[in-house]
Amino acid sequence: MIVELAPRFLAWDAVDPACHAFDSASVAQTVRSLGPARCVPVRPDVPFGDPMMSAWSYGEAESWVDAMSYALVQQYGRWAIGWRWSHDEGDFDGGPVGNWCCPRHSITTPEETLDRVGAALREWREWLEYLAGWFEAYPLDLADIEDQRILWERAARNLILQVVDRTGCGSGWHGHCRQVLTWFLLRWDVAPDVAQGLVDEAIGGRFHSWTGPDTVLVDDVAEQLALSLRPADGRTRADAPAQDHLQRWLALRASVPWHEIPDGGTDGPVIPLRDGAAQDIRAFDAVIDPARAAGMLSALEALRADAAREARLDFALLSSWQQHILGTPQPPPFRTSPAFAKASRERYGIAPDTRARFDRCLAESALETGRPLGVTARAARVYLDICFFHPFDDGNARSAFLTLVFILACEGIALDQVSLLRRVTFEADDPQDPLILLRYINIHLAETRRRSADSTGSASR
């Protein structure tokens, strides 16, 4: 699983300042023009240790911060998600940003909060520009590695020290250090998988939270990294055949032990205390754009009506919901060209039988006879089908989420929270991702049952 709004997964091409324009002087105005600026949440007037503060911080406030990240990415590009990578134990461990901590501490008045967002974004961008300057100060070439090893070693040592100084060696600082060293290798054309492996091997788990590395350790890591590089570690410059991640997903899909995974839906229907899907749409999507939320809520209402009448899931039904999601005059058609996602890291091909294969996958989401597959497994599988078939030109993640809700609704199941099911993304060929998604569904379902049962028990006493 990759958390789409987590900066630790950013590659150098996604953050390289040379590839992404930025006007620092206009940041304050731009931040205030975004949807989330209209509705900065109000912090409750209670002590930090009060349970009400925790509920607010992990609920309304966190959804608002996620919405602000989403809006900044739409405005500036994916590099902008690093604005909240704060020092120590903030939103994300061990980052270089000091102007933001976390919702609990950083959301105050609307003006102060938006000022902090803008300052944090500028600080993150300045750090990226600073790193780019350091990278360019060592114009290295793998072809001449034997003559340049001392320069590669010096560059690595300096970068480690820069990260140490910038992060303060708090909680998780070593994660960003690994990232910066990997970025440096990527800048000078080391292959991505090789770069990450060499950095991990050189560090060898010897950097620790809340502990700064001594000079001997820094020198040893830098030396090992430089000595491990080879001319053959560079990127392949020949044109490689385009990868089709849809085919990778279909191969993985056939190998997942769907029938062996515990099913949280075996105890039958569950009616939650609140509508978790609608609540999340109002807390996240409405903050970004009220029209976006209205479309999703309209689709949610339609799909629940379709579940109540026992409609069978097919592309026509899916497209009817997508018309609500996107606000189009007609139900959108199936795509006719290759699709891309995750900053073009994944490519989903198109062939004469792609639509037919998608139809067959959708049909498998229905309750089978003979050897029935559990409802949570079917919900997880169709969610990933939509992600990797990528049937629409836009809004596929929203479609996948709402279709998951439909599959559960067909069995009389609704969730009171969906936080683990949104604003995340999965890899088409990672064998753990289907199991992780299924586990998340089961967690939410178990918690919904528990809270509903607790409420019923309290009411009867």
Image: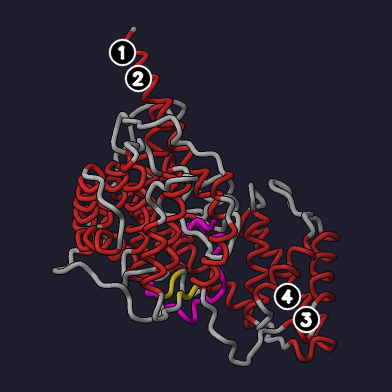
**Contact? badges 3 and 2 (CB < 8 Å):** no
Residue type at tag 3? Leu
Whichever of callouts 1 and 4 sits on the residue coming sooner in the sequence is: 4
Q: In this view, does 136 lie to the left or right of 37?
A: right
**Contact? badges 4 and 2 (CB < 8 Å):** no
Vertical comparison of 265 with 66: above or below: above
Total marks shown come to 4
Residue 23 occupies which quadrant of the picture? bottom left
Who is closer to the viewer here, 443 or 10?
443
Residue 420 occupies which quadrant of the picture? top left
Q: Name the residue under label 3.
A: 151
Q: Which residue lies furthest to the left in this view?
A: 329
Which contiguous range is marked in magenta?
Answer: 1-24
Could you give the CA–CA distance between mark 1 and mark 2, rounded to whole angstroms?
Answer: 6 Å
Q: Mark 4 points at which residue?
A: 155
Q: Which residue lies furthest to the front in this view?
A: 370
